[in-house]
Image: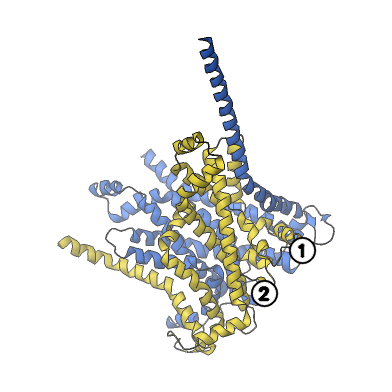
Chain colours: A blue, B yellow
Amino acid sequence: MENVQKRQHASKVKKSTTQMSEKKKDMLSGYLYIAPFFIIFGIIGLYPAVFSIVLAFQDWNGLGEMDFVGLNNFVVVLQDPLFWKSLYNTVIIGLMGTAPQLIVGIILAYFLNMAVIRFTNFFRVTIFMPYITSMVAVALVFGVFFSSSETALANYVIGLFGVDPVSWKTSEWGAKIAISLMVFWRWVGYNTIIYLAGLQSIPKDLYEAATIDGAGKVQQFLHITIPMLKPFIILTVFMSTVGALQLFAEPAVFLGSSAFNRDEAMTVVMYLYRDAFNLGSFGTASATAVLLLIIIVGAAALNTWLTSGVGRKQKRRAFTK
Amino acid sequence: MRKSKGLKKGTLPVYIILWIASILSIFPFYWMFVMATQPSAAYNSIPPTLLPGDQLVNNFMKVLDTIPFFQAMWNTILLCTTVTLAVLLISSLAGFAFAKFEFPGKNFFFILILLTMVIPPQLGLIPQFYLVSQLGWLDTLLGAGVLFLLNPLGIFLMRQYISESVPDELMEAAKLDGCSNFRIFRSIVLPIIKPAFATLGIIVFTLVWGEFLWQFTVLRDPASYTLQVALASLNNAFRVDFGMLLSGVFWATVPLIIIFLIFNRWFISSITEGSIK
């Protein structure tokens, strides 16, 4: 009897110790498996980010000693008209390139989601195809289409509508329109796919109920489709805002060798790049990087807040009714 | 009968809009091909040239004279493949840990990963460049690839997929049989998460294939050029030969288009899975 109890006790102890070591093993495995990511993150993510913020307060050309200069780099950047011009360009191109894209994306997705439409897979594939083209390829093809020569295909097309030829690469609005169009062309299919996934997640009986209640197609679109798509709209607005403020490859490649010498399409990231790698001023370039971080976080927060406010207002109105 | 007739009538404008959208999406590809087969002068003709010519080979020969095209293609494929495999390994290990193991600080680390997604890549550009140059990795694929190993989205996807599709009971049973955690990862988790590998693999591969800023910053020696950097350099001449330029773009784009057309379902679903989950 005693013996049996002892044995039971022993096995219990053994079990609990093996469980303990099992738990410990799992803990170790956990740390071990996330370690590669965090080691890499520390070296090429966190360290550079912190170093950048430190650099923003130093005078440094990458070779000699660093000099602490306080806020001077920020003063230099903020007093440089070219910084403000590049910020203005970035915002204008961003708005022209992304805002229409979101609207067209919703419309195309809505059409592709209509049960009566056939060949949807064909349309889906073709409309999505621009997205897999690299930004450099798009910028080069559009660069020829919008070349500065009077015989550019773009000039021929606007000529059909009686518009005079535009010098696309050297005029203030020509460059902005061409770059916005290439951003639009490359991303509209991407957003269409996201909205399409959103539309497919809306339960069909909502529409059936609305039809029974006598709501028309437009009313259904405004009162069911748009509110139900809200999370997807917030997502795309957020990604477009962040992406637009980081614009670099399109303008830099579109303008070729003159990209960093002209200001019609210089973006904030191009301004940063020019400071760092053409002018060798790492301090002011880092100050620009920090400013860009603040701008991106601010704009993303603002846009997300604005888009999530759209439905809230309606809800409140419905509630007060 | 009446109903189907009415539907057809109503859908005509929809079809027209979808066709216009499709044609506008495809036209630049077609035009790129046309220009790649025409002499540079064809560009100036009025009305514009819209049919292929006979300079396909000639233009491509000019590309080969100007940039190390095949070297750049090889560099790109090597870079994309290595980075993709490394990211798949790093993400699936970490995703496995976050999905199936309990350890102190788990939530903290996971939120940290969330935060890394918000930092714009340009913030660290200068120190990253400095770091890579100090390591002597400028003009190497190592330097060009190291930045892409950081892929927080991959961990999200893997954690999600593993917690949904790897049953706890299966892990328990394997443990009772004396399997080590790594053995479980290799023989149970990896086979189950193959579909997630396809999704993440496509995302990473196309990302690295198309990225420009970092590759442009790090790769300055033509022998180390990837396709994007090499193509961009085609546009730097004072007088650009458009036929040659678009021939380069065409041949650099064709491989990815073929892969896309074959696997288009995977590509398209990778977008929704990568951004919505």
Is residue A292 among what the camera can see? yes
Q: Residue at x 60, y 54 (%)?
A: A296
Residue A41 percent coordinates (x, y): 65, 50
Tell me the tag on residue B222: 2
**From the viewer's perspective, is the residue at label 2 or at label 1 nearer?**
2
Label 2 packing within 10 angstroms: few (<14), some (14-19), many (20+): some
Q: Are marks 2 and 1 in contact (CB under 8 Å)?
A: no
Q: Residue at x 35, y 63 (%)?
A: A121
The foreground one among B70 and A218 is: B70
Q: Residue furthest top?
A: A1
Determine whether A276 is above or below B173 in the image: below
Residue A203 as seen in the image, left or right of residue B93: left
Badge 1 amino acid:
Ser
Mark 1 lies on residue? A281
Label 1 packing within 10 angstroms: few (<14), some (14-19), many (20+): some
Residue A165 percent coordinates (x, y): 51, 82
The foreground one among A313 and B134 is: B134
Tell me the tag on residue A199: none
Secondary structure type for disc 2: helix
Q: Are the residues under badges 2 and 1 in a single subunit?
A: no
The foreground one among A120 and A76 is: A120
Residue B12 percent coordinates (x, y): 27, 68
Badge 2 amino acid:
Pro
Determine whether B42 is above or below B217 in the image: below
Secondary structure type for disc 1: loop
The foreground one among B42 and B258 is: B258
Is residue A301 among what the camera can see? no
Q: Residue at x 27, y 48 (%)?
A: A210
Q: Label 1 is found on which chain of the structure?
A: A
